[in-house]
Amino acid sequence: MCSSDLLVLPWESASASVTSALFRDHRSTGDWIEFPFDSLKANLRLGNLLMRRQELEVLAARSKRLEERLKEDDKSTLGNNLHYKECLEREFERTRRNKSPLSLIFMDICGFKQVNEKYGHEFGDFVLRNVGNRVREALRTSDIPVRFGGDEFKLLLPDTPAPAAIIASKRLIKALARKPVEQGDISYTIHCYFGISTYSGDGETTKAQFNSQADQSVINAKKLGRDAISFWDPKTNGPSPRAKSKGKASTSENEAESARTGREP
């Protein structure tokens, strides 16, 4: 029996036990009236049933919202680490089956600790909200951005090879630094470090290794300076440096990004 609202008008010989058996499926809500019945009684029962359905819908919507908030970072309004773990499990398995590349960007804000120390945590939270908004605008709706904690973010990009992830990082650099974050007389321009790893679905790389490769890459990016991009190179089995976001991307990167987003990079 599918989810439904039922008002049963039983036949004359139907017993209460037979009628109640129609509502044993927990996905259904229902009521019945005993024989004989009149139209007024039936209308009242039907009205009560519809009111019960509305109450259940309100409770379901509230429950869904509470569940969503458990997976939301309250400062950046992006997903949190719980959300990331669930999505990584799903996307990692999908990549393993379909062999469609999955990329991960570790993004750390440059000097965020000093921002909190100099301007206070209220302004620091304001910066995090701005980062969340700008990251969301720069990525596809199918991409999965989360704040891991502090100044650390993880951006999970389904169907994205390494060259397209590099282009996405460059897009983020521009989006984050396009204008300063301002509050009162405080002005701060957002710069970040980027570390990239890509899983091809080979079945050999584990989720822990996938995360570690992006982590080691962002550590390497910090050695290169702000807005630097470093990616995990499977040929050397280590992080490779990447020039800062200056100049044009390579043809292969442009083609990969166009395929990823359906738009020109």
Image (spheres, rainbow, N blue to C red):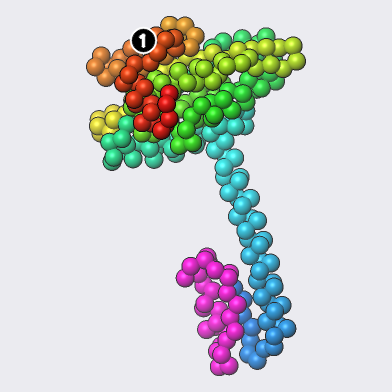
Q: Which portion, as a residue range, is magenta?
A: 1-29
Say if 18 sits above or below 67 in the image: below
Q: Is residue 66 left or right of residue 262?
A: right
The residue under the point 60% across, 77% down is 7
Say if 62 sits above or below 219 in the image: below
The residue under the point 67% across, 9% down is 118
Mark 1 Cα-neighbour bin, 10 Å: few <14, some 14–19, many ≥20? some
Q: Which residue is mark 1?
A: 241
Q: Nearer the viewer, residue 227 or 115?
A: 227
Farthest residue to the right: give it.
184
Q: Position of residue 76 (x, y in %)?
A: 60, 28
Say if 112 sits above or below 73 in the image: above
Q: What's the residue type where badge 1 is placed?
A: Pro
Q: Is residue 45 left or right of residue 109?
A: right
**Residue 116, located in which quarter of the rendered image?**
top right
**Residue 150, located in which quarter of the rendered image?**
top right
Under tag 1, what secondary structure?
Answer: strand
Farthest residue to the bottom: give it.
13
Q: Assign the C terminus to one quadrant of the image.
A: top left
Q: Is residue 149 left or right of residue 234?
A: right
> Visible in this render: residue 39?
yes
93 in the magenta segment: no
> Visible in this render: residue 215?
no
Q: Nearer the viewer, residue 13 or 165?
A: 165
Q: Position of residue 232 (x, y in %)?
A: 33, 18
The residue under the point 36% across, 22% down is 254
Q: Position of residue 96 (x, y in %)?
A: 29, 37
Say if 145 sits above or below 119 in the image: below
Q: Nearer the viewer, residue 31 or 165?
A: 165
